[in-house]
Structure formats: structure tokens, C-alpha cells
Image (cartoon, helix red, strand yellow):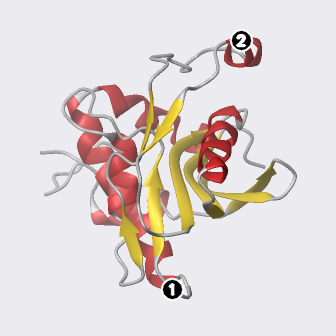
Amino acid sequence: MKCLLCEQYALTHICKECQKLHLLPSRYKRKIQGKVKVYSFYRYKDIEPLLFTKHTDLGYYIYSILASVSFAIFAKELEIDGDVAVIAVDDRVKNGYSHTSILASSMQKKALRYRVAALRDYSNTVYSGKNFQYRLLHPREFVLKEFKERKVILVDDILTTGLTLTAAINSLKEQNKEVLFCLTLADAQGK
């Protein structure tokens, strides 16, 4: 196959050289609810064509590569005390895989526990391409499955308005969970 970026023959969809050249993550930080930190690894505009693959078969491979060069490395470097749940925002399988599950499950560390299907949205609302007003009028309806850890790292793919993460944080707080911080692959406002 050929690398999607340089078009040279490669064993992966994005060759190792292009991963080093073009997918080196930066850390962008925003706060939502005035205090919860959200760390993003890329600016949306920098990886937009790759993000568009999420609703295709190719997306599984692209998101796996992006997770390995960002979330996985972050987890290895993370200094953390006690057990912490890693919760993907609505890790429901669509198109054969869950993009948020790929991101969350890449965070391999002894103290981190990925809790599959712990936070599901039952509103069936699709925010992709929708404006802020639409998102306000059609809130997420998260249901939290029980899990033992009190501390949580929340994972989503894209931070746009912050409404999805805010709703997720509120659902977790209602169950006396503490969100340490949130991680997203890309920030639409990344500066």
C-alpha cells in the first residue's frame, strides 16, 4: 500500500517517516466549566482530512495511528496516583468500530482502567457539522454505567464548543466522580 501523506510504499496507512514529520502532537489546553482542563494533541485544521476518515473503514487505521502517536505516549508519560478510569465519550460502535474507544484504549498504564461502554449518549443527536445554537437546543442525554474508580480521565475525539464534554462531566459529577482532566485528539479552536 502507499502512505496517504507521501504516497511512498509503506506497511502502514501513514508511514513511520510521515508520522514523525507530520503527526508529532503538540498540546493545546482549554478549560471548560471554568476549571476542567482539556488537553488536545492537534489543531483541528492541521489534521482535518484525517479526522474525516472516522466514518469510513479507513478511519479505524487512521485513528489507531493517531492514538499511538498521541494518547499512548501521553499515558506512558503520565504520573498518576491510584486507579483512574479512562472513559470514552459515547464509545458506541459505528461503521464497524468506535473512534473514541480506539483513543481511550490506547492509554495503557497500570493505574489506568479503560471502562468500556461506561458513558453512553441516548439522545441519538449528531453534532458533526452543527452550529452552537443547534447543540444548545439538542443536549446530550448521557447515562453512566457503574464503575469503581472515583477519578476519571474523559476522552473524546474533537473539542468544538465544549458542550459534549460539559454534559459528560455533569453526568460524572452526579455520580460523585472526579474528572481529573479531559483529552481530545483535536481542538477546533486550537491556537
Q: Which residue is mark 1?
A: 82
- Identify which amino acid the numbered label 1 is placed on: Gly
Question: Residue at coordinates 83% horizontally, 58% vertically from top-left?
Answer: 35
Q: Residue 46 appears in which quarter of the rendering?
A: top right
Residue 70 seen from this side: no
User: Which class describes the residues within 10 Å of circle 1: few (<14), some (14-19), or many (20+)?
Assistant: few
Q: Residues within 10 Å of mark 2 (few under 14, many from 20)?
A: few
Give, as a three-letter code, the residue at label 2: Leu
Query: Closer to the camera, 155 or 13?
Result: 155
CA gap, disc 1 and disc 2: 38 Å
Which of 169 and 45 lies nearest the eye of the viewer?
A: 169
**Looking at the image, how many numbered discs can be counted on the residues?**
2
- Mark drawn on residue 37: none
Q: Position of residue 123 (x, y in %)?
A: 49, 19
Secondary element type, mark 1: loop
Q: Position of residue 93 (x, y in %)?
A: 26, 34
104 relative position to 190: left or right: left
Q: Position of residue 83 (x, y in %)?
A: 46, 80
Residue 140 is situated, as x and y percent measured from the top left of the image, at: 58, 26
From the viewer's perspective, tell me whether residue 83 is left or right of residue 137: left
Visible residue check, residue 45? yes
- Residue 65 found in image quarter: bottom left
- Mark 1 and mark 2 in contact? Answer it, CB < 8 Å: no
Indicate left or right for 35 with 48 as reference.
Answer: right
Instruction: Look at 75% across and 19% down and name the residue there.
Output: 132
Residue 154 lies in quadrant: bottom right
Q: Residue at x 24, y 46 (%)?
A: 61
According to the image, label 2 marks what residue? 137
Quarter of the figure that contains the N terminus: top left
Q: Earlier in the sequence, mark 1 or mark 2?
A: 1
Above or below for 53 versus 88: above
